[in-house]
Image (cartoon, grey):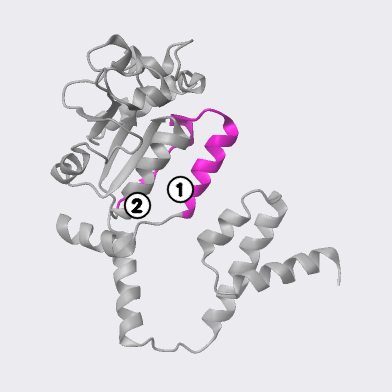
């Protein structure tokens, strides 16, 4: 058996193991491009073999799950774009909680915001805000204090009429905020998360959103973490997770 044959045999074992494709793709994220091409070929070959077999009728319960899943996937996404913590205290050089990489994403993020406005996608600015005596400042240093210039949105990304603003005091945008109510009012089922820091606010918000049944998208060019490695880890974790099934179904029923 050649080296290529061994690779194909190993990939075949993975494909027929029943392991979800999402887990396989995440696990092979760092694999050489040639391996990913081979994986796609193996999947296609296995699909071809399956189609050649006589069909087997699924049980009523399985059929209901398949039909429901297909209907959910075919449904157009109702998106809202969230801009998280793009504030002066995170983008100004020398500030205690500066995220230098966040300045690099401003042009791409501004372009996405303009596109969202043209397409009438709701935009929600999620702003970190603290009272002067907030004990959280003891751990993280003084930042985003209510009423100070540091808590304001970075000027090139200033909200425009019609944009919504949600204030939160901690990592997740859902904690001690009215974000859930705003999203319900906007009738959305998918959140496009942008801003900083990817491994903190975006990751915490994404995790909460997925557990509440929202689909989550994080455009790579509109997010910024402390380092490229941190971004890669956080984005990989979000990619690995799917919306919690029961919460997703409840959310879609609510939206009608």
Looking at the image, residue 175 lies above or below residue 37:
above
Please provide the residue range marked out in magenta. Answer: 214-240
SS at mark 1? helix
Q: Position of residue 228 (x, y in %)?
A: 58, 32
Labelled disc at residue 210: 2
Q: Is residue 169 left or right of residue 8?
A: left
Which residue is pictured at 53% across the width and 63% down the height?
21
Which quadrant: the C terminus?
bottom left
Magenta span has 164? no
Q: Position of residue 203 (x, y in %)?
A: 42, 41
Q: Is residue 230 left or right of residue 209?
A: right
Compute the Cα span from label 2 to label 1.
Answer: 9 Å
Mark 2 is surrounded, within 10 Å at the Cα level, by few (under 14), some (14 to 19) or many (20 or more) other residues, namely many
Q: Quadrant of residue 141?
A: top left
Which residue is pictured at 22% across the width and 57% down the height?
251
Which quadrant: the N terminus?
bottom right
Q: Quadrant of residue 193?
A: top left
- Disc 1: which residue: 238
Q: Is residue 125 left or right of residue 90?
A: left
Which residue is pictured at 16% across the width and 42% down the height?
186
Q: Residue furthest right?
A: 2
Q: Are marks 2 and 1 in contact (CB under 8 Å)?
A: yes
């Amino acid at each position: 058996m050649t080296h290529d044959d061994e690779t194909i045999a190993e990939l075949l074992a993975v494909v027929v193991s029943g392991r979800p494709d999402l887990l396989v793709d995440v696990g092979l994220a760092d694999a050489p491009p040639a391996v990913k091409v081979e994986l796609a070929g193996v999947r296609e070959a296995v699909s071809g073999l399956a189609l050649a077999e006589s069909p087997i009728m699924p049980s009523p319960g399985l059929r209901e799950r398949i039909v429901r899943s297909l209907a959910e996937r075919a449904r157009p996404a109702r998106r809202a774009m969230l801009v998280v913590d793009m504030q002066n205290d995170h983008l100004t050089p020398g500030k205690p909680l500066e995220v230098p990489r966040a300045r690099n994403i401003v042009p791409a993020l501004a372009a996405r915001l303009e596109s969202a406005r043209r397409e009438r996608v709701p935009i929600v600015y999620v702003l970190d805000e603290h009272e002067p005596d907030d004990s959280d400042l003891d751990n993280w240093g003084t930042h985003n204090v209510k009423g100070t210039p540091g808590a304001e949105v970075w000027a090139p990304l200033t909200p425009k009429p019609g944009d919504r603003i949600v204030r939160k005091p901690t990592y997740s945008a859902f904690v001690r905020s009215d974000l859930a109510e705003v999203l319900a009012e906007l009738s959305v089922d998918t959140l496009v998360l942008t801003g900083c820091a990817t491994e903190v606010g975006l990751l915490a918000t994404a995790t909460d959103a997925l557990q509440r049944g929202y689909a989550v998208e994080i455009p790579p060019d509109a997010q910024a973490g402390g380092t490229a490695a941190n971004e890669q880890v956080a984005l990989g974790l979000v990619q690995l997770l799917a919306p919690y099934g029961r919460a997703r179904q409840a959310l879609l029923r609510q939206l009608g």
